Image (tube, coloured by chain):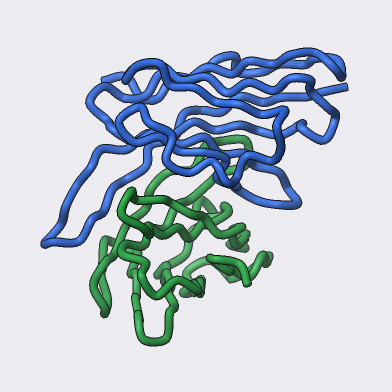
Amino acid sequence: DAGVIQSPRHEVTEMGQEVTLRCKPISGHNSLFWYRQTMMRGLELLIYFNNNVPIDDSGMPEDRFSAKMPNASFSTLKIQPSEPRDSAVYFCASSPRVVLEGVSGNTIYFGEGSWLTVV
Amino acid sequence: QKEVEQNSGPLSVPEGAIASLNCTYSDRGSQSFFWYRQYSGKSPELIMFIYSNGDKEDGRFTAQLNKASQYVSLLIRDSQPSDSATYLCALISGGYQKVTFGTGTKLQVIP
């Protein structure tokens, strides 16, 4: 059973270039999350989707960042133009909706991450 | 105040000892709580989740939840060098199940 698939795994790009990160969630999962991880700030939630609809994008750092989920099996995170401070690991994660004894709970499954370096 | 707070560590314990990792949170409406383990250069992986007050045990791991005091903890018994990793606390809040992570506690188990 395939997990969350992210591409590219590693990318090095020059400042000012456009970066597009891609994610294929686990089939049947209805929530998708984009996280950014750095040593200084830890794992930050950028945006999450529920049933392909963006629910909360308050974590998106600025207008240079955008995310889309055109269908249940694909999402992109785009940075345009990229800056050196965007260098980080970007994780995509997905989860099913589970209700446990009346309490909503789910398990997030992470992709292997996209390691971005902007020089 | 951060939504989820953890001591960044590192927390060093000798092999065979009990490691205790703590996490506090600010949103009383938080519903479910998770502990993830992340090895260096890898993605986080789920260890266990808890949503009721009290203790939940799974092998060498015990999660403890106290909603009144707004803290969650993870105990690792008989710590092994392979347990050396960063442990992330996470919680779910809101009707759309927003999942928020703490910054993690680095655990070092000394042989």
Residue B17 percent across, percent down from the top left: 49, 74
Q: How many marks?
A: 0
Q: Which residue lies at the image location 30% right of the left edge and 31% below the top edge? A: A51
Q: Nearer the viewer, residue B25 or B50?
A: B25
Q: Nearer the viewer, residue A119 or A64?
A: A64
Q: Is residue A82 above or below residue B75?
A: above
Most extreme residue toward the bottom, as rendered? B68
Q: Which residue lies at the image location 28% right of the left edge and 32% below the top edge? A: A30
Q: Which residue lies at the image location 61% right of the left edge and 31% below the top edge? A: A90
Q: Is residue B93 above or below residue A110?
A: below
Q: Which residue lies at the image location 82% right of the left edge and 23% below the top edge? A: A118
Q: Visible in this render: residue B6?
A: yes
Q: Is residue A55 above or below residue A111?
A: below
Quadrant position of residue A38: top right
Most extreme residue toward the left, as rendered? A101
Q: Which quadrant is the C terminus of chain B positioned in?
A: bottom right
- Chain A, chosen colour in render: blue
> Is residue B13 toward the left or the right of residue B24 in the image?
right
| The chain in green | B
Residue B84 percent across, percent down from the top left: 56, 54
Q: Nearer the viewer, residue B52 or B111?
A: B52
Quadrant position of residue A65: top right
> Is residue B65 toward the left or the right of residue A33 in the image?
left
Q: Visible in this render: residue B111?
A: no
Q: Which quadrant is the N terminus of chain B positioned in?
A: bottom right
Q: Is residue A33 above or below residue A99?
A: above
Quadrant position of residue B30: bottom left
> Is residue B44 toward the left or the right of residue A26 in the image?
right
Residue A114 percent across, percent down from the top left: 61, 24
Residue A67 percent across, percent down from the top left: 55, 25
> Is residue B73 toward the left or the right of residue B40 in the image?
left
